[in-house]
Image (cartoon, rainbow, N blue to C red):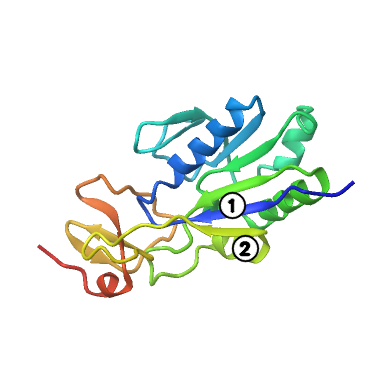
Amino acid sequence: MINIAQFYYKYGTMDSSKTANLLMAVHSYETKGDKVLIFKPKTDTRSKPNIIESRAGLSHFCIDIDKDFNIIDYIADNNLIESTDAIFIDECQWLTLTQILNLCFIVDKLDIPVLAYGLKNSYVKNELLEGAKYLLYYADKIEEIKNICVYCGKKATMNLRMVYEKPIYNGNTTHVGDTKETKDYYIPVCRKHYFNPIIK
């Protein structure tokens, strides 16, 4: 049998509609009658438990997972291998190397496509996030979900953390924030404005 499934990694900056893109892709599958599974790391605490939600108001049931969660065991134990047409992962930058290798197994051995959406770089010196690094190693297809800099309209490639209107360049890379908060928030920026933000 020829394996046709692929492992997709779709990344973008904060506020680039990653989750909305995921949910629209899920809708496309489900309108054709396909069965999908959606997983979200528990690291993302912005939504209610077992709910994936976009800023545009779209939402869907999902399965919250921690770093020890084994997706292969889950689909095998629940007899979901034959009935699953695709697997979606939101906030995939929080996945572990083991989980990413398990997703490779699902694609290569079980012939189930995996579509992973998330960030690539942290706000700390624009360093690659751990999960993103391994996704860049192992994904079959890597696609950028483009966004623009809030200051100049050029392509945004970085995430700038602002706390009380001051840029923050050091800290915990697993700090979870949003773009709609007022005290501690993220904005998508180009390189120039990452290092030289316009402070009002």
Residue topped by disc 1: 95
Residue 28 point in image, percent of width and height: 56, 33
Residue plotted at (69% across, 44% down): 113
Residue 125: name its quadrant: bottom left
User: Does residue 153 show up?
Assistant: yes
Can you tell which quarter of the image residue 47 is in?
top left
Do residues under tags 1 and 2 come within 8 Å of each other at their CB atoms? yes
Please report the residue visible at 59 percent of the width from the left and 36 percent of the height from the top.
Answer: 38
User: Which is nearer the eye, 4 or 183?
Assistant: 4
Disc sitting over residue 134 in the figure: 2
Quadrant for the C terminus in the image: bottom left
Q: Residue furthest left?
A: 200
In the depicted structure, whether residue 97 falls above or below residue 114: below
The reply, left or right, for residue 22 in relation to residue 82 is left
Q: Earlier in the sequence, mark 1 or mark 2?
A: 1
Q: What secondary structure is found at the residue carrying circle 2?
A: helix
Disc ID at residue 179 = none
Residue at point 74% right, 42% down? 112
Task: Give the alpha-carbon distance from disc 1 to disc 2, as whole Å.
Answer: 9 Å
Give the residue drawn at x 37%, y 64%.
123
Q: Secondary structure at mark 1?
A: loop
**Amino acid at the residue labelled 2:** Tyr
Q: How many marks?
A: 2
x, y (%) of residue 185? 27, 52
On the image, the x and y values in percent for residue 81 come to 78, 33
Give the amino acid at mark 1: Leu
Position above or below: 160 against 80: below
Closer mark to the observer between disc 1 and disc 2: 2
Badge 1 crowding class, 10 Å Cα cut-off, few under 14, some 14 to 19, many 20 or more, is many
